[in-house]
Amino acid sequence: MAKTRPPVYRAGDRYRLRISDDELALIRRLLDELRDLLLSDDDGSGATSAMLTRLFPVVHPDDPELEAEYQRLMRVELVASKLKSIEAVEAVIDGRGASIDEAQLTAFMQSINSIRLVLGTLLDVTDDPDAEVVSEHDDTAEYQLYSYLSWLLEWTVRAFSGE
């Protein structure tokens, strides 16, 4: 049995990405789309906001007024943090072949997960163990992309945790 070469791995006290140019181009395109979504969602009330629901989880589910205030106060900061992570990942992609540090790997992990969360929302993917498994998406390009990003995220977490 052939050993799987990890796409993300630890190299001493730094990390390396072993991702093809095509995959990096795809990730860059997805980051651009995520940035566009984040920048177009200024008030959190429209269709774009629905796609970003998992990026901005409800903190006060039993108090709509308190929740609205929290989102009003924190949303700008959360968007800024996500945009900063996107910029860091773009720098990593541009420096293809260079080793990256823990902060860059964290930004990569956060950005990949943000893309996954948006895509998972569009596909109605849930982590509820009692939910009915939706198989209508299993062979769509979007679901395959979701699976790839999940696989990439898993390897990123493994590298980060030293596995």
Image: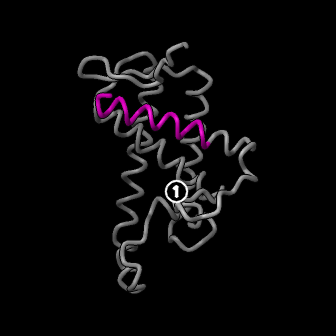
Tell me where residue 103 appears, x and y as whole percent: 29, 36
Q: Which quarter shows the C terminus?
A: top left
How many residues crowd around disc 1 within 10 Å: few (fewer than 14), some, or many (20 or more)?
few
Question: Residue at the left extreme?
Answer: 13
Q: Is residue 151 magenta?
A: yes
Residue where numbered disc 1 is placed: 39
Image point (58%, 41%), residue name? 30
Image point (44%, 22%), residue name? 17
Image point (55%, 27%), residue name? 24
Does residue 19 appear left or right of residue 69 in this picture?
Answer: right
- Magenta part of the chain: 146-163
* Secondary-structure class at tag 1: helix
Tell me where residue 20 appears, x and y as whole percent: 57, 20
Q: Which quarter shows the N terminus?
A: top right
Image point (64%, 40%), residue name? 145
Query: Which of 91/102 is in front?
Result: 102
Looking at the image, residue 70 lies above or below residue 99:
below
* Chief secondary structure of the magenta portion: helix
Counting the numbered discs, the total is 1
Query: Which of 96/58 is in front?
Result: 58
Query: Which of 22/83 is in front?
Result: 22
